[in-house]
Image: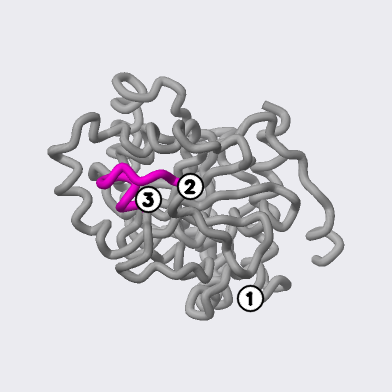
Amino acid sequence: MTGRRDREWPRPDNCRIITIANQKGGVGKTTSSVNLAASLAMHGAQVLVVDLDPQGNASTALGVDHHAEVPSIYDVLIEDMSFADIVVPAPEIPNLYCAPATLNLAGAEIELVSKVARESRLRRALEAYDTDKFDYVLIDCPPSLGLLTVNALVGGDELLIPIQCEYYALEGLGQLIRTVDLVKAHLNQQLKVSTILLTMYDARTRLAAQVAEDVRNHFGDVVLNTVIPRSVRVSEAPSYGQSVMTYDPGSSGALAYSEAASEMAHAGAVQ
């Protein structure tokens, strides 16, 4: 693992802004955001995680302070604060940065309604910020299709959808794809579904293999070859303020996220 960690992966010509969304809860959005970001940073990329979930779980997993008084993404969206005033380095991993979320964000859905250009406030803030110093910006979304997620879809160029390998996996995806199509038609023509990541894969069950096959048949080449297994280590890591990449680098979950991030990095270099 150490040898692989030291090896740099290809870096994209321009900053890739990737929104990680699925309105279903518990599919691994935050876990994937944090661990993919950590893997990319460990292999030489400059990475920013934008925590757009009021629960602030990505901020927690990166060891970043996010109590109510901390300048956060809420201040960017509602108070027009600059990204430069809120972005902080993640203490555990060089090259990795975070725009934290606080509980204030819970009220942002309502406060955004009356704002001018409410769907594109995140994009404007990112455009005003020097994102060129990053190779990747990963935007972690809340489990809903409200204004925060719409801001993330307008703000990103790519969409990564985590899909858990369980019975109701594809339920609700149609609604997400319809929302994506609306955003493309009216607000962000660049947006494309670039990556599907299969999570919570249990190799012991036929159901997991069936769901994986269905997803691959439906979405084709954008589905990563790597699947993320169910892993206790992945679940434990955030409670220690860490990604699984630093908490237990040799675990099956860490190795899988490293492989998935490698696929993303090399696919981006080919595009």
Circle 2 residue: 84
**Viewer-side label of 2, 1:** 2
Q: Please indicate whether residue 247 sits to the left or right of residue 104 in the image.
A: right
**Residue 181 or 223: which is nearer the viewer?**
181
- Residue 269 percent across, percent down from the top left: 72, 32
Whether 97 is among the magenta residues is no
Q: Residue at x 54, y 37 (%)?
A: 130
| Kind of residue at badge 1 | Tyr
**Residue 71 or 224: which is nearer the viewer?**
71
Circle 3 residue: 141
**Viewer-side label of 2, 3:** 2
Q: Residue at x 37, y 65 (%)?
A: 70
Of pointers 2 and 1, the one earlier in the residue sequence: 2
The part of the image, by quadrant, that contains residue 135 is top right
Circle 1 residue: 247
| Kind of residue at badge 3 | Cys
Q: Which residues are magenta?
A: 73-84
Q: Residue at x 52, y 65 (%)?
A: 205
- Residue 91 percent across, percent down from the top left: 60, 68
Q: Are marks 2 and 3 in contact (CB under 8 Å)?
A: no
